[in-house]
Image (spheres, rainbow, N blue to C red):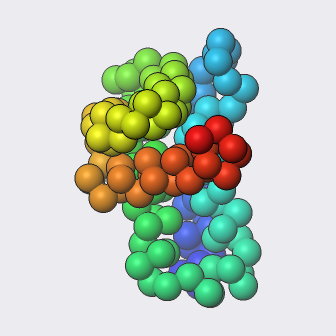
Amino acid sequence: MTKRQMVVERLQMLVDLCYNTIPDETDNCLFHEHMIDAEKLLDQARDKERWVELYPDERAVVMSNANRIWKIRNKIKKGELPKDYLSDMADVIESYIKQGQKINAIKLYRKKHDCTLREAKDYIDGVEMDLKNRGIM
């Protein structure tokens, strides 16, 4: 088994965990952020050409993001967090960014995801870029 195959297997475990721990219904979204992120990570690892082109530190970011989601989803599975944990966070983060309160968005993301400042900033920068690409900002 190659390293990439091992990563694909583990990311599939993450996707399965996300599907098993998402809320039954949410008022503000059809697909939970973790489910979307886990699927993206899995797609990235499954694509052999894309995976080979990633620098080692970019691969590490994929695995680090997977670990962050894994920790939270396992806490939900064990009943330590409610199933709807984080369900409205994306809307709040987008609102902070639109209001120019990027630091508050980073603080909220760090608090909810138990991640490093760098991970939170990278995520918030990505959301901001997405908002700009969609013409919302």
Quadrant of the drawing holding the N terminus = bottom right
Tally the numbered discs. 0
Q: Position of residue 37 (x, y in %)?
A: 59, 49
Give how far across and how far down residue 135 sits, in percent: 69, 44
Q: Is residue 59 left or right of residue 30?
A: left
Residue at screen point 70% across, 45% down: 134
Residue 72, how many percent across, how many down? 40, 38
**Rendering coords of residue 83 (x, y %):** 50, 21
Observer-nearest of 65 and 7: 65
Q: Is residue 62 above or below residue 136?
A: below
Q: Residue at x 29, y 41 (%)?
A: 103
Residue at 65% x, 61% y is 42
Res. 54 in view: yes
- Compared to residue 52, the image places residue 121 above or below, namely above
Q: Nearer the viewer, residue 135 or 112?
A: 135
From the viewer's perspective, is 103 left or right of 78? left
* Residue at 56 percent of width and 82 percent of height: 54
Asked if residue 77 shows in the view, the reply is no
Of residues 49 and 101, the one nearer the viewer is 101
Residue 60's image quarter? Answer: bottom left
Name the image quarter holding the C terminus: top right
